[in-house]
């Protein structure tokens, strides 16, 4: 078998792909891609004109996919496409150069494809399925390309792929880490200054504490006062949204505002310097929470957060596979 590149693609129109033997991507406002200069920068410039409201990251991703679709894909390359209507992995071979179909409802950028095999998702390892589940609409399959191409062999037996899948642990961990990164980025992007204080107060409420947010300014560094119930102890909370690590002196200022019997809580999206960590270790009445620990609490109490914050950090509860030994 000649070595060919393997591409992955997603669609909302299974009928078009499977019954008209094509693959396609959208971006109708880009028009005929063959009229754009053959360079990624030219594609970015065209995208900015066609979609002026698009964010910088989205421009680069879309331009890259469009450029690859017309200029990097070659006749004879393979394409893997997971269909939603029957939960199969469809394997095809590219049969045409780029086609511009202006009358298409959505997918005006197309290529002809010959579908070779249609296999159940269970025929492939969890890692291969995870790679094909890329967030991008069109992408190159790299890590698990050989596994998909092996399915083209005449003696391919899907059942052999179902035994002891050692990719499950890595895939589950990847999903967890991706989710954690998403949460921390959402917090860092949307919650600065007083906004982070309000979020922390809401999180503490979700954890069962009664909270009051201090008036802005003149609060002696105390942002939130929390109680577990109507009785002491009082918990004084200081919140910092700065990107740099928290220093020992900042923790000492919190300690200075505390009265006898108080407990302290310091919350940051970043981390603590080594001296600050040592200070926290030697001062058990103050608990420090960094960005990683804050994400842990968000995941634990997510369903009890206010709707406002669940919309800011949109998550869906799903089950992921674990290795058999767990």
Image (cartoon, rainbow, N blue to C red):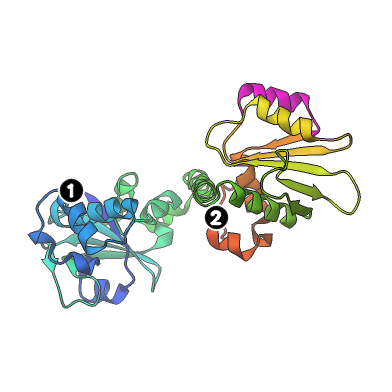
Near-viewer residue (226 or 63): 226
Q: Earlier in the sequence, mark 2 or mark 1?
A: 1
In the shown orientation, is residue 304 left or right of residue 106? right
Q: Pick out the residue farthest to the front.
A: 218
* Quarter of the view holding residue 122: bottom left
Near-viewer residue (246 or 179): 246
Q: Position of residue 225 (x, y in %)?
A: 77, 47
Please give the label number shown on residue 41: 1
Instruction: Report how many numbered discs are placed on residues in the image.
Output: 2
Q: Which residues are magenta?
A: 272-285
Would residue 60 be counted in the magenta stretch? no
Res 315 seen here: no
Which residue is label 2 attached to?
320
Name the residue at 72% across, 30% down. Answer: 253
In the shown orientation, is residue 32 left or right of residue 237? left
Camera-near label (2 vs 1) is 1
Name the residue at 84% across, 44% down. Answer: 234
Near-viewer residue (86 or 191): 191
Q: Is residue 142 above or below residue 116?
A: above
Q: Position of residue 193 (x, y in %)?
A: 58, 46
Name the residue at 87% across, 43% down. Answer: 233
Q: Main secondary structure of the magenta part?
A: helix
Q: Is residue 135 above or below residue 192?
A: below
Q: Position of residue 127 (x, y in %)?
A: 43, 49
Name the residue at 76% across, 53% down. Answer: 212
């Amino acid at each position: 078998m000649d070595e060919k590149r393997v591409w992955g693609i997603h669609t909302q129109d299974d009928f078009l792909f499977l019954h008209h033997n094509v693959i396609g991507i959208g971006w109708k406002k880009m028009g005929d891609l063959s009229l754009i200069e053959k360079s990624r920068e030219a594609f970015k410039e065209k995208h900015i004109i066609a979609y002026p409201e698009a964010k910088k990251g989205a421009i680069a991703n879309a331009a890259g996919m469009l450029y690859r679709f017309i200029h990097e894909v070659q006749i004879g390359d393979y394409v893997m496409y997971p269909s939603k209507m029957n939960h199969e992995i469809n394997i095809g071979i590219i049969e045409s150069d780029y086609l511009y179909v202006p009358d298409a409802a959505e997918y005006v950028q197309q290529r002809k494809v010959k579908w070779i095999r249609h296999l159940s998702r269970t025929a492939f390892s969890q890692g291969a399925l995870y790679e094909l589940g890329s967030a991008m609409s069109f992408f190159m399959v790299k890590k698990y390309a050989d596994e998909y191409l092996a399915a083209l062999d005449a003696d391919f037996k899907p059942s052999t792929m179902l035994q002891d899948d050692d990719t499950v642990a890595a895939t589950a961990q990847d999903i967890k880490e991706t989710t954690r990164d998403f949460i921390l980025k959402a917090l860092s992007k949307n919650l600065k200054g007083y906004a982070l204080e309000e979020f922390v107060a809401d999180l503490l409420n979700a954890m069962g504490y009664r909270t009051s947010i201090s008036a802005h300014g003149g609060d002696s560094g105390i942002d939130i006062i929390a109680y577990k119930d109507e009785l002491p102890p009082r918990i004084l909370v200081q919140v910092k949204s700065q990107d740099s690590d928290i220093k020992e002196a900042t923790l000492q200022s919190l300690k200075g505002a505390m009265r006898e019997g108080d407990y302290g809580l310091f919350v940051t999206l970043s981390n603590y310097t080594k001296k600050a960590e040592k200070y926290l270790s030697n001062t058990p009445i103050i608990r420090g929470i960094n960005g990683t620990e804050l994400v842990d609490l968000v995941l634990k109490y997510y369903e009890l957060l206010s709707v406002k914050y669940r919309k800011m950090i949109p998550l869906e509860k799903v089950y992921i596979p674990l290795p058999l030994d767990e």
